[in-house]
Amino acid sequence: MRMGITTSSRALALTLTLSALALGCKDDDPVPVADGIFAERFGEPLPSATAEQLEIFRRGEQIATKRFSPADGLGPHFNVTFCGACHEKPTFGGSASHYRDFLLVGQELADGSRVELGVNGVLPQFELSEVESVEMGECLDPRGVPTGEMGAPPGMGPASAVSERRAEDPRANHFANRNPIPFFGVGLLAEIDEAAILANADPEDRDGDGISGRPNLDRGFVGRFGVKSQTVSIEGFIRGPLNNHLGITSNPLSNELRVALPVPSPAEVRPTTRGLSSDDVGGLEQAQAAAPDEPTVDADDVCDPELPEQDLFDLVSWAMLLAPPRPDAPTEESERGRALFEDANCTGCHIPQLESPRGGIPAFSDLLLHDMGPELADGVVMGRAGRTVVEDPNGCPESSGRGCEFRTAPLWGVAATAPFLHDGRADTLDEAIRMHGGEATGARDAYVAMSDEERALVITFLESLGGREQITAGLLPPGSEMPAPGELGGPLRPLDETERALFEAGRLLFDRDTPKGDGLGPGFNGDACRSCHFEPTIGGAGPIDVDVSRQGRIEDGVFTAPEGGTMAHRFLRSGHGRPPFDPTSNVVEARQTPPLFGMGLMEAIPVETIMALADPEDADADGISGRAHVLPDGRLGRFGWKADIPSSAEFTRDAMSMELGLTLPPQEGLTFGLATDDDEVPDPEATVEELEALTFFMAMLAPPARQRRDMAAEDAGEVLFGEVGCASCHATLEAADGTTVPLYSDILLHDVQEEGYEGIVSGDASTREFRTTPLWGLRDTGPYWHDGRAGTIEEAIAAHAGEATAVRMAYEALDGEARAQLLAFLRSL
């Protein structure tokens, strides 16, 4: 067990390093690189981890990838449902593409000051509404002592709730975009001596090189985590986002557990009168907000803390043990690139290594704050970060220099963690370098002045800093094998060579993160098809943290769509806030991501087969009056919650434009999608070949195979499924060749909503009408219902109303054994 540095030894070390800070001294004789710090691949633990730590690492990874639900305490406001959502690229622990960007939000006042809004300054995308009531009792603290609060134990909270996009705070007038940063190697950064960081600080630029890095502070310690080095504690860096992004509350770790962490966390608070700067005192409260040392609480019905202390310990340990990737063996090209990198003085901030007790840590970062100029400024002050100290002709003037300072980003594994910079504005490393300003102006200009060959060598060097073999355009690992025919995510039948190439091309395009330079936006919900369709595998459904919103106005029973359509996008290409709701709208309806498996088989069902099931006037008086959604051009709608899309090709075009914001070329006989938009990328932003590959991939996705566990119960449940009337809408159909298609949907519109429900109109589908949801793959594609309100299959059944009322009541009248059999059948689908 490693113990932390004592308070007295910290004070002595600080005293010794203050003189170095004042002189701007730098270490010209680096120690050897530490042994046992690099993993062969991203996502692996430090090679030096003990057997006990490896077990903790595995447990922590399970917490990082756990999907939290309202029952666990998710919300009431949140951005994501699991930690790995923002740290998934190229694997868990990394960064993320733009669909996981988040916003800091505040109100700028007339005097230039800024007040944080949202949840500790973070703008939540979603809030839970229509939350199911739960049986509550007196909450207990971790020692079993009553707290005086009422709630349900974690895991026993509301199982169902509607996730809605959160309305904007009218006071909000300042937003700062953030792209998630990777965790690889953070435990090593935590071990770096403060003296090693302070030795490179030169806040007054006394050596006249134009680089004046200075430390940020957190509780009197030198900060090192976050884009502004605002946090010193990995525990705090995890507890803050758990609360701000998931709404999951926690208590600080006990001192006993803190010293048992792979890297002990500072538990004490230092005095702020350390001789560094008079700015120290004013910044500590805001730094604390980012790294809470007090218990976090929220206003939902689940008792706080919602994350057990052992789970928090495992999660923090997992982050500390994540290793950086091993850099490539030097080559002539990478060494020439490194020399050019040094000649341009990129190493003035991206210092090759810092000293720690185990040896040199080659993160290529001084972990200090630097003024990066007005173009990159975000207007956010965190601690000391953001207050201009030295007047720099290339930086932010002191009168307007709020938010110009950022931590030097570590570069190990950098090439595999695009997009780049604090807000993800750079698609490539070349763009990121060209966007540097302020103190980095000289290095940037030196890079720009290089020849094309020399700049390529610099990029080659950066790509050599680890993880090159894991660079991917999306989340599929390079060389990922296509699933076999019939497997989930694979084709529904064997493919010939030409078909296989087309399917694989479509699969890669489906997974590909679309850069802003390729036309993403101006408004968008995701930057890849996979952004929403990834559970349980690519092409599947999505959790409630990728739900989208539809909007409109209902007045006197008449629905009116906004001029720009019913879509309410989640993101703006600019990153300056969220796309606002249409001011005329008074109805907003959430949309849960549906799975795409079996689309081609659904499309192959003859129109006549579907039309024969329609009974719009309920001529047989069974209370069920499904009707076909016939579009104005006469085509039959099949896909989407409102059956408002007629074919897989049109589904592709609709999603590419409405979800990603891409403009499309014309295709004969197809009418969906946008031809133009108002961004700076030339139209069309996709090609016919890309659209055809995507369509082929989706149309060929195999439907999920049944998983039989208890055949007797499942067979009995299937009989009951028909007897209670579920099969009246959830029907199996036949393709043109007579093959049975077990999708369990008649592809018709039905009114299945409770009395008084008002939603969105789409085409001929009224506010209350929805297509019968196909049930194949039901076991793996929750939450359920069009707005994700049902967390379980039982809750989905209970939500049925309207035409389905009699069927629901018949189910409810079954005895316990019969219900269990019917549910066993559904869970086998």
Image (spheres, grey):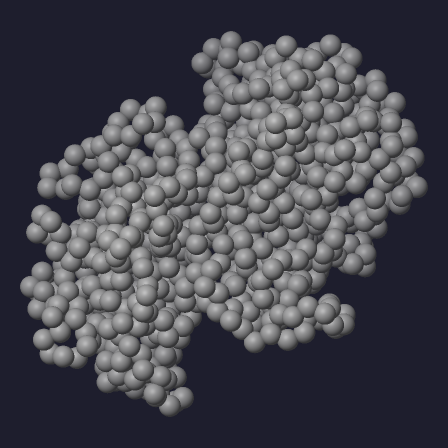
Which of the pair 213/416 is nearer the observer? 213
* Front-most of residues 672 and 443: 672
Q: Is 609 placed left or right of 474 in the picture?
A: left
Asked whether residue 364 is in view, the answer is no
Q: Is residue 740 above or below residue 398?
A: below
Could you tell me which residue is drawn at 69 percent across and 37 percent down? Answer: 230
Q: Position of residue 129 (x, y in %)?
A: 47, 60
Identified at 69% across, 21% down, the residue is 388
Q: Relative to 780, is 124 above or below?
A: above
**Quadrant in which the N terminus is drawn:** bottom right
For the C terminus, which image quadrant?
bottom left
Quarter of image, res 302:
bottom right
Q: In the image shown, does 787 or 229 lie closer to the viewer?
A: 787
Q: What residue appears at the point 87 percent right and 32 percent down from the top-left corner?
A: 273
Query: What x and y, as percent, mark residue 343?
Result: 62, 13
Q: Is residue 242 visible?
A: yes
For residue 735, what is the image quadrant?
Answer: bottom left
In screen coordinates, is 172 left or right of 287?
A: left
Q: Residue sitting at 17 percent across and 55 percent down? A: 764
- Tell which of 43 and 795 is nearer to you: 795
280 to the left or right of 514: right
